[in-house]
Image (cartoon, grey):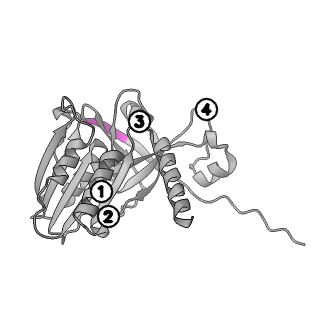
Amino acid sequence: MSSRPAPAPRNRRAKLAVVRRTERVTPHMIRVVLSCADFTDNGMTDRYVKLLFPKPGVEYPDPLDMGVVREEFPAEQWPTMRTYTVRSWDEAAQELAIDFVHHGDEGIAGPWAASAQPGDKLWFNGPGGAYAPDAEAGWHLLVGDESAVPAIGSAIEALPAGAKAKVFLEVEDESEEQKFGGFGEVDLTWYHRAGAGVERGERLVEAVTSLEFPPGDVHVFVHGEAGFVYKIRRNLFADRGLARDRVSLSGYWRLGKNEDGWQAEKAETARKERESATS
């Protein structure tokens, strides 16, 4: 009896980007501009990439192939993966810009961005993403905290001339505000956590729930910390009855958890929901 050959490792070859320069957009936001010949733009303004940070002391295949890594390395040696939104892609210059929130030595990606130097390598997979502002919408509603600022900035700058948008953004204080380009008619309100005396995201929830929606078809984007995203979700669907395909919602992260912990929590919640549905 002939034996079937073992399956070849899956090809999950990562794409390589090289740091060209960095800049401080705000005191806590660092923009890293990378040279990348392999990036394929998907046309989404919430396009995201999975950044791969090597574990210290581990030698990986070059080019980095996550199929090979998962087949041949123990899980504790796999690169740490972090999800980040692409702020911009310049096809002519082959430049990929990614914005990182930086709070000192906390986390992995922020400290990497703070110390990045021209010539440093960064491996990634992607892009993914599923949202871009609909040019035919009557108006747009964009809501988020600083984790969503890159995607919302990209969306604002993609609006066609004359497109109307209401934008609510929450950051730590006035120094974290940014300016955006574009040609749309944008009504932008910044909310500051410092000294506000309310929970994170509560003023965003209040802004959306108290907003008198203008007439016309609305296209909505609400991304950021999972707690306030969930509250706004209830208002949009249960109270206002918006169609699901007109709303992009994502709780990027959960207060008090890193990406690994938050993804594990979401997976466990989904498992319990599946079990409850079949019981």
Q: Indicate which disc, 1 or 4, sits on the residue closer to the N terminus.
A: 4
Q: Position of residue 140 (x, y in %)?
A: 18, 61
Q: Is residue 141 something that shows in the picture?
A: yes
Out of 262 and 44, give the one closest to the viewer.
Answer: 262
Q: Residues within 10 Å of mark 1 (few under 14, many from 20)?
A: some
Q: Position of residue 244 (x, y in %)?
A: 31, 67
The alpha-carbon separation of the residues under discs 1 and 4 comes to 44 Å
| Cα–Cα span, label 4 and label 3 | 28 Å
* Residue at numbered disc 3: 256
Q: Nearer the viewer, mark 1 or mark 3?
A: 1
Q: Secondary structure at mark 4?
A: loop
Residue span colored magenta: 20-25
- Residue 273 forms part of the magenta stretch: no
Marks 2/1: CA–CA distance: 25 Å
For image coordinates 17% across by 40% down, the residue present is 191
Residue at which label 2 appears: 43
Q: Which residue does the numbered mark 1 point to in the structure image?
A: 233
Residue 141: mark in rendering = none
Could you tell me the amino acid type at mark 3? Answer: Gly
